[in-house]
Image (cartoon, helix red, strand yellow):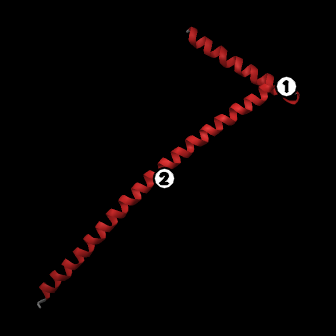
Amino acid sequence: MSIPLEAIHLLEDKLKNLFSNYEFLKNENEILLQNATMYQQKLLEQQQLIEGQQKQYHLLKIAKTIEGSKENTRETKLKINTLIREIDKCIIQLNA
């Protein structure tokens, strides 16, 4: 064979190899993007779960302080005052 013909065959082989690698990487990229989307969804669900648990904890904490044990009377009074201020703000906004 002549040198130009060998160079063409070598170039064709390299192009086939390059195209094969491109297809493989393209497929791998699609899989990784799907996985990333799935993990982002799971992360969002976990964050929502944590927020829900934090709200429940906060409500439980308020319920315990409002329960009015003798050792937490000061904290209970502060919570009640805070709740009254929040109610007053809501009433002012409703009247505006």
Image quadrant of residue 35?
A: bottom left
- The answer to whether residue 33 is left or right of residue 13 is right
Residue 69, given in percent of the width and then of the height, sits at 85, 28
Residue 21, given in percent of the width and then of the height, sits at 30, 71
- Residue corresponding to mark 2: 39
Kind of residue sitting beneath label 2 = Tyr
- Residue corresponding to mark 1: 73
Identity of the residue drawn at 69% across and 36% down: 57
What crowding class fits label 2: few (fewer than 14 Cα within 10 Å), some (14-19), or many (20 or more)?
Answer: few
Residue 13, given in percent of the width and then of the height, sits at 22, 79
- The answer to whether residue 76 is left or right of residue 15 is right
Quadrant including the C terminus:
top right
**CA gap, disc 1 and disc 2:** 46 Å
Identity of the residue drawn at 20% across and 82% down: 10
Q: Residue furthest right?
A: 70
Residue 36, given in percent of the width and then of the height, sits at 44, 54
* Residue closer to the observer: 84 or 60: 60
Quadrant including the N terminus:
bottom left
Q: Earlier in the sequence, mark 1 or mark 2?
A: 2
- The answer to whether residue 21 is left or right of residue 80 is left
What crowding class fits label 1: few (fewer than 14 Cα within 10 Å), some (14-19), or many (20 or more)?
Answer: some
Image quadrant of residue 66?
A: top right
* SS assignment at label 1: helix
Task: Identify whether 62 is placed above or below 3.
Answer: above
Kind of residue sitting beneath label 1 = Thr
Task: Identify whether 4 is placed above or below 85.
Answer: below
Identity of the residue drawn at 23% across and 74% down: 16
- The answer to whether residue 56 is left or right of residue 25 is right
